[in-house]
Image: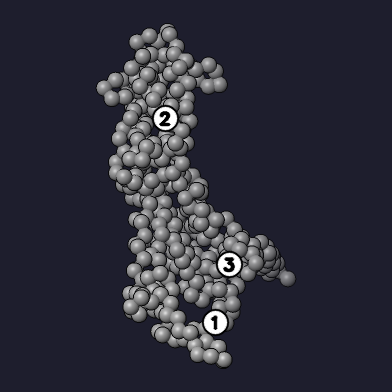
Amino acid sequence: MNARGVALQGGLAALGLLAALLTWQREPEGLPGEVTVLDISKRALQRARFDDATRFVEVFREKDGELWVRIGDKPKPPAPAGATADGGVMDGGVAAGASDAGPAVVATAGASDAGVPPGPAAPPAPPAPPKELRANQNAESLFNRLAPLKGTRSLGELDAKKLEELGLVNSPRKLTFTVDGREEVLTLAAPIGIGWGSPYALRGDGKVFLLGSAILPDFEGGMNRLVDRRLHTFEGEDFDTFTVSQGKNARTFVVSGKPPGAVTVAPQTAPDKPDEFVHNWHDRIWRMLAMDVLGRGEEPEGGVPEEVFRVEYRKGDKVLGFLTVARGAKGEFYAKTEHSAGWVRFHSGLETVVNEAVKVATGT
């Protein structure tokens, strides 16, 4: 064999080895973690929505890049035909409780004394408007995991009987993705006895997949798992003064030192005289936790609450943020900050802190 033939044989052998190596490294469809259910780019994904029979949870990105969560209830289905106002079913005068030995005793359930049945049940009340809330870091992580959407296994195309057995026929549970203005819908069902550990997902082209276990729990627990409950995005060591206002009274305080070292709070008019009372009071204000988060544009029950005090934070001449605490119509306390989407509700034990705000703002 001449040199040219040897070189050709060697090249073909090298190509064969390379092809074998690539084939060996590429895992077949169906192995855990390697199935692409929807090939979505992070840049193209605009929103993802989970629906069940009673509610929905939606994560979406606005034009400014901010991620938000929308949570809402679905309208309740109308009462069944023939249902009465009290939830019973009209019997149309059919005898009830008859025996073979005697005449039937006629019972007209739900009928009035005049023998006229009550009118149909009132239609269910419409659901409350959905809440729009700031998304937290967990929501950001979830949104990133959806593009591309991976599954643990592909089951291929299944016949109608098998789809019904899996619960994928007429299932109210859906995952809907908005990608560059178009929608991709997955119908969901839970494997029997496994819950939502690895749900089945039916794609629009008829193919069925098993999804991973880390997606649906976040959607189902959206209010607790996806909503940003922080009052501020800056930290306690980021500001050097704060001003407390209550009515027409206001005082500014200077903050010196940083954790883990000693931190002192003193009136701006007497920076060399630390005020431990104000320091402790502000620590309680800074550590307040929200019990409930209202949506963007949502007002508390009873109307706009009445402001009782306000704290403004600065770093030098720059305003970093604020905290406005207000009392609602039923005596409950709410707050707004530079970061909150709307009002947040606090527990009922803030009466002492609110009363002490007068002393802090007046210096008395």
Q: Which residue is mark 1?
A: 160
Q: Nearer the viewer, mark 2 or mark 1?
A: 2
Q: Secondary structure at mark 3?
A: loop
Distance from the alpha carbon under mark 3 to that under mark 1: 17 Å
Distance from disc 2 to disc 3, alpha carbons, whole Å, reads 47 Å
Place of residue 167 in the rendered image (x, y in percent of width and height, measured from the top left): 55, 73
Assign the C terminus to one quadrant of the image: top left
Q: Is residue 168 visible?
A: yes
x, y percent for residue 271: 40, 10
Residue on which the image places disc 2: 351
Compared with 68, 314 (above or below) is: above
Q: How is the image coloured?
A: one colour
Q: Position of residue 170 (x, y in %)?
A: 48, 75
- The earlier-in-sequence mark between 2 and 3 is 3
The one of 124 and 262 positioned closer to us in this rendering: 124
Name the residue carrying label 3.
190
What residue occupies the far front of the structure in this picture? 102
Q: Amino acid at mark 3?
A: Ala
Mark 3 and 1 residues: CB-CB less than 8 Å, in contact? no
Q: Earlier in the sequence, mark 2 or mark 1?
A: 1
Drawn side of residue 314 relative to residue 9, left or right: left
- Cα distance between the residues tagged 2 and 1: 62 Å
Which circle, 2 or 3, is nearer the viewer? 2
Residue at horizontal 57%, vertical 55%?
214
Label 1: how many Cα within 10 Å (few below 14, some 14–19, many 20+) = few
- Which residue is located at x 40 percent, y 57 percent? 72
